Amino acid sequence: MSEGRINIRQRHGSHLLIERDGRWGIVERRDDGLYGIDPDARQGHPDNEQGPDNEQGMDAAADWTDEATAKSRFEEVVARGEALARKMW
């Protein structure tokens, strides 16, 4: 059984909200790498093997969950990023 394509549902800064076959996740794309958002598991995965939408890297980096949880976490990540940006400026 093959899996469907990973779809980027939302982008904000370096963060992507992604979906594949009803599973949802968040990855951060930076410095030619893809990273999950779990602070204890921030190992990067290359973002250059299959072009800009590297499904293998996204799949490895994402902490897959249900839609509601992923969307809530994405909103939290975006809010933290915006708050940090305001402090820096």
Image (cartoon, rainbow, N blue to C red):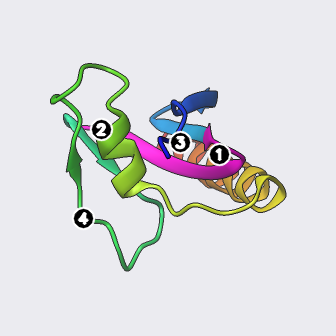
Looking at the image, is mark 3 or mark 1 earlier in the sequence? 1
* Left or right: residue 68 compared with residue 84: right
Mark 1 or mark 4, which is nearer to you? Answer: 4
Tell me which amino acid carries mark 1.
Val
The answer to which of 14 and 23 lies nearer the viewer is 23
Residue 5 x/y as whole percent: 51, 30
Q: Quick one: label 2 or label 4, which is nearer the N terminus?
A: 2
Secondary structure type for disc 1: helix
Label 1 and label 2: CA atoms lie apart by 15 Å
State the residue lying farthest toward the top.
51
Query: Where's residue 63, x and y in %?
Result: 52, 63
- Between the residue at mark 3 and the residue at mark 4, the CA separation in whole angstroms equals 24 Å
User: What is the magenta range?
Assistant: 19-30
Q: Residue at x 31, y 42 (%)?
A: 56
Query: What residue is disc 3 on?
Result: 85
Q: Is residue 24 rendered magenta in the image?
A: yes
Q: Position of residue 48 (x, y in %)?
A: 17, 28
Please state if 54 lies on the left or on the right of 6 as rendered.
Answer: left
Residues at circles 3 and 2 in contact by the CB criterion of under 8 Å: no
C-beta proximity under 8 Å, tags 1 and 2: no
Where disc 4 sits, the SS reads: loop
Residue furthest to the right:
68
From the image, state whether disc 3 or disc 1 is nearer to you: 1
Q: Is residue 33 left or right of residue 27?
A: left
